Amino acid sequence: MLSPEEKKEIEAEFPLYPTKQAVCIDALKIVQRHRGWVPDEAVRDVAALLDMAPDELDGIATFYNRIFRRPVGRHVILLCDSVSCWIMGYERMRAHLTERLGIGLGQTTADHRFTFLPNVCLGACDRAPVMMMDEDLHADLTKERIDAILEECQ
């Protein structure tokens, strides 16, 4: 069930769009901001609020890689695996993050601090390799830079 706050925030978006269905991505982001991810019951509740079929909304939710359909850690690390990043050291950065965090791609640390995910492109090819942690883009990665970024999350 949507919380009163979630419902109020979603309904506040209605005047900004031509139809209720057009609010779907913002509605999913609102739920995720409140819960950390978007569970199945929230998809059903948001779909009902927007007069959409749950399967239709789930298709939208699963299309966007920044909408999380299962629980994630407090910090989500997206490591770019585009061609530019591969050429500039993706494999070394992936191996270092895997060793440092003790998890592989698609996994969350036991303490729920970090989730480590691949990302097709982060749009910073000129500064490869890159990763995004939460909302912050980190470019020109080295092992030392990754260590410093992770230390900031202590």
Image: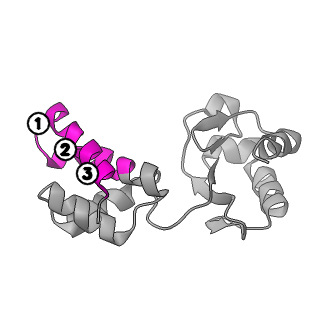
Q: Are discs 1 and 2 less than 8 Å apart at CB?
A: yes
Q: In 3D space, how far apart are the residues under numbered discs 3 and 1 (Cα atoms)? A: 18 Å
Q: Are discs 3 and 2 less than 8 Å apart at CB?
A: no
| Precedes in sequence: disc 3 or disc 1 | 3
Q: Quadrant of residue 1?
A: bottom left
Q: Main secondary structure of the magenta part?
A: helix
Q: Colour scheme used in the picture? A: one colour
Q: Which residue is mark 3?
A: 7
- Tell which residue pokes out farthest to the front in this image: 4
> In this rendering, does residue 80 appear at all?
no
Stretch of the chain drawn in magenta: 3-30
* x, y percent for residue 133: 64, 44
**Looking at the picture, which amino acid does disc 3 mark?**
Lys
Q: Element type at marker 1?
A: loop
**Looking at the picture, which amino acid does disc 1 mark?**
Pro
For residue 18, which numbered disc appears in the image?
1
Q: Which residue is mark 2?
A: 22
